[in-house]
Image: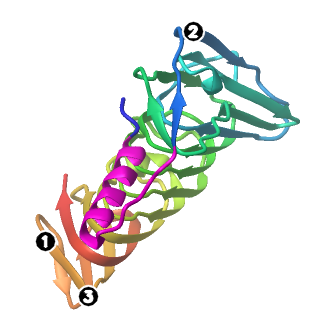
C-alpha cells in the first residue's frame, strides 16, 4: 500500500510552486524498511464488572477487524517491516490502548523499499466502548455481533468498508464517524442498534446503508463538504430526511417523497431521522 497523504501533499506543493513560480526546497528523510516481523497480539479480558474502553490507534497500512475471539478482548497478528510500526499495548484498569509505534518524520519521507504494516484483529464480545483512530489506511471492519456501547472512529485519507452483518448485542448510545478525503462505505447500520449517529466528512465518497434490524428510533446527523453521499434505507422503514445544502444536488429513487427540503418514506416500526448538511456535491437517496 502506498502512503497516499504523502503523495497528495507532494502533488499540492508541486502545483503551487508551478502556478506561483515559487521554488520550494523540501527536506527529505530516508525511512528504511527491514525484514518483515510477525507478532502475535493477545490482550486479556478486563474486569467484567464494568465495560472495557478499547482504543485502537493505527497509522498507515491495512487494518482488518472481525468478531470472533472468545477468551480475550483482542487477539490477532501484526506484520510490519518498519521497526517503529511495532504495536504497543497499554492497560490501565479497564482502559486498553493498542497503538502503532511512534514514527517521527522530520521531512517528506522517502521509502527506499515498500513498507508493510498489516493488522488482522479479532474482538471479543465483552461489552466495550470502542475507539479507532487511524491515518492513511485501508480498513475492512466487521463489527456485527459484538457488544458495543459506543463506537468512535476518526481517520484521514482512507479507504474503509465497515459493516454490521449481525445485530449489535447491546444498545449503542452513540456511533460517531469523522473522516477526511476518503472513500467510506458503511453497511448494516440499522444492526448497530445505535440511538444516535454522527457522520462528518470532507471531500470524499461516502455510502451509508441503513439495512439490518432497526430496534429503536435512530437520529442521524451528516455533515459533509464537497462530496458524494449515497444514503440507502430499506423499503418499509419509516424515515425522514431534512436537507441543507445550497450548492448540492439531490437525486431520489424508490419510495422517497419530497416536500420542500424534507424527504420522507413511510413505513412501520422505529423511525430513522436524518439531518444532512452539505457544502457542495451530490446526495443520492435510494431504497434497498
Q: CA distance from mark 1 to mark 3?
A: 14 Å
Relative image position of residue 179 (x, y in whole percent):
45, 56
Q: Residue 246 is drawn in which quadrant?
A: bottom left
In the displayed structure, would residue 220 be above or below residue 119?
Answer: below
- Left or right, 85 with respect to 155, comes to right
Q: Residue furthest bottom?
A: 260
Q: Nearer the viewer, residue 26 or 59?
A: 26
Closest to the camera, between mark 1 and mark 3, is: 3
The residue closer to the viewer here, 103 or 1, is 103
Per the image, the residue denoted by label 3 is 246
- In the rendering, which numbered label is found on residue 251? 1
- Sequence-wise, the earlier of marks 3 and 2 is 2
Image quadrant in which you'd find residue 230: bottom left
The kind of secondary structure element at disc 2 is strand
Tell me the distance, in whole angstroms, between the alpha carbons under discs 2 and 1: 48 Å
Relative horizontal placement of residue 77, taking residue 52 as reference (left or right): left
3 versus 21 height, above or below? above
Mark 1 or mark 3: which comes first in sequence? Answer: 3
Q: Position of residue 17 (x, y in %)?
A: 32, 64
| Residue 213 in view of the camera | no
Q: Is residue 16 above or below residue 47?
A: below
Residue 145 placed where, x, y %?
51, 33
Give the crowd class for mark 1: few <14, some 14-19, many >=20 residues within 10 Å: few
Span highlighted in magenta in the image: 4-27
Which secondary structure, mark 1? strand
The crowd level at tag 2 (other Cα within 10 Å; few <14, some 14-19, many 20+) is some
- Distance between the alpha carbons at the discs numbered 3 and 2: 51 Å
Amino acid at each position: 500500500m502506498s502512503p497516499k497523504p504523502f503523495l497528495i501533499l507532494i502533488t499540492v506543493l508541486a502545483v503551487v510552486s508551478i502556478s506561483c513560480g515559487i521554488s520550494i526546497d523540501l527536506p527529505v528523510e530516508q525511512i528504511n524498511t527491514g525484514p518483515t516481523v510477525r507478532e502475535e497480539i493477545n490482550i486479556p479480558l478486563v474486569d467484567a464488572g464494568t465495560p472495557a474502553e478499547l482504543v485502537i490507534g493505527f497509522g498507515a497500512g491495512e487494518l482488518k477487524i472481525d468478531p470472533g475471539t472468545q477468551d480475550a478482548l483482542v487477539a490477532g497478528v501484526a506484520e510490519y517491516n518498519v521497526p517503529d510500526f511495532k504495536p504497543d499495548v497499554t492497560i490501565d484498569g479497564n482502559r486498553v490502548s493498542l497503538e502503532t509505534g511512534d514514527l517521527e518524520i522530520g521531512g517528506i519521507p522517502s521509502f527506499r523499499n515498500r513498507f508493510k504494516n498489516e493488522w488482522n484483529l479479532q474482538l471479543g464480545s465483552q461489552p466495550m466502548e470502542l475507539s479507532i483512530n487511524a491515518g492513511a489506511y485501508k480498513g475492512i471492519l466487521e463489527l456485527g455481533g459484538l457488544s458495543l456501547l459506543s463506537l468512535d472512529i476518526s481517520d484521514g485519507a482512507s479507504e474503509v468498508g465497515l459493516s454490521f452483518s449481525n445485530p449489535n448485542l447491546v444498545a449503542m448510545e452513540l456511533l460517531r464517524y469523522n473522516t477526511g478525503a476518503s472513500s467510506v462505505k458503511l453497511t448494516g447500520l440499522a444492526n448497530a442498534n445505535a440511538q444516535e449517529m454522527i457522520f462528518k466528512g470532507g471531500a470524499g465518497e461516502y455510502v451509508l446503508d441503513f439495512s439490518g434490524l432497526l430496534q429503536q428510533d435512530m437520529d442521524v446527523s451528516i455533515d459533509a463538504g464537497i462530496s458524494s453521499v449515497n444514503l440507502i434505507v430499506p423499503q418499509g422503514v419509516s424515515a425522514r430526511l431534512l436537507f441543507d445544502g445550497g450548492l448540492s444536488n439531490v437525486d431520489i429513487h424508490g419510495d422517497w417523497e419530497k416536500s420542500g427540503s424534507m424527504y420522507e418514506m413511510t413505513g412501520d416500526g422505529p423511525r430513522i431521522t436524518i439531518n444532512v448538511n452539505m457544502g457542495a456535491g451530490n446526495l443520492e437517496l435510494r431504497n434497498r
